Amino acid sequence: VQLQASGGGLVQPGGSLRLNCRTSSAIFSRSDMYWYRRVPGKDREFVASIVSGGTVNYADSVKGRFTISRDNRLKTVYLQMNSLNSDDTAVYYCSMWQRYWGQGTLVTVSS
């Protein structure tokens, strides 16, 4: 399974970004999808998840600011990130079932 994450970049505090993670996997619609992030020197941190049935879950640190969604037709999972702050600076990884991982996309929040 290959996962291709994109959408990272440099954004000012208070700004927004949308991350995308696309796969060609035929079983995407039946898969639980996750977003994690890692700050250098720290452990990987759970950000959000969306299961095949659509139920979502968020880390407390991003609740109310981030929204995870999926488009089964496009085989893509999204992470809409609003009200970004410096603590959100990290490499963001998408995952299928916490088993398969994308290459990561860097988000930098800085003025």
Image (cartoon, helix red, strand yellow):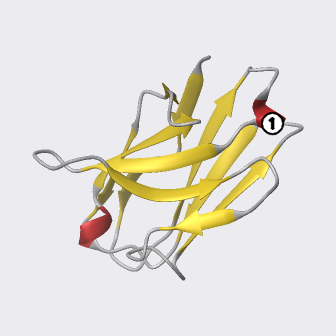
Image quarter hosting the C terminus: bottom left
Residue beneath the point at 82% across and 20% down: 26
- Dividing the picture into quadrants, the one containing residue 13 is bottom left
* Residue 36, horizontal then vertical, whole percent: 42, 49
* Residue 14, horizontal then vertical, whole percent: 40, 80
Secondary structure of the residue carrying tag 1 is helix
Residue beneath the point at 68% across and 45% down: 77
Q: Nearer the viewer, residue 6 or 2?
A: 2
Residue position for label 1: 30
Residue beneath the point at 29% across and 52% down: 90
Q: Residue furthest left?
A: 41
* Residue 57, horizontal then vertical, whole percent: 59, 66
Can the viewer see residue 111 in this picture? no
* Residue 23, horizontal then vertical, whole percent: 68, 26
Question: Vertically, is 85 above or below 95?
Answer: below
108 displayed left or right of 43:
right
- Dividing the picture into quadrants, the one containing residue 68 is bottom right
Q: Residue furthest top?
A: 1
Tally the marks. Answer: 1
Question: Vertically, is 70 above or below 56?
Answer: above
45 displayed left or right of 56:
left
14 displayed left or right of 97:
left
Question: Vertically, is 89 above or below 83?
Answer: above
Residue beneath the point at 34% across and 70% down: 12
Which amino acid, mark 1? Arg
Using a 10 Å C-alpha cutoff, classify the residue at mark 1 as few (fewer than 14 neighbours), some (14 to 19) or many (20 or more).
few
Question: Vertically, is 9 above or below 76?
Answer: below
Can the viewer see residue 75 in this picture? yes
Q: Nearer the viewer, residue 48 or 108?
A: 48
Image quarter hosting the N terminus: top right
Q: Nearer the viewer, residue 86 or 52?
A: 52
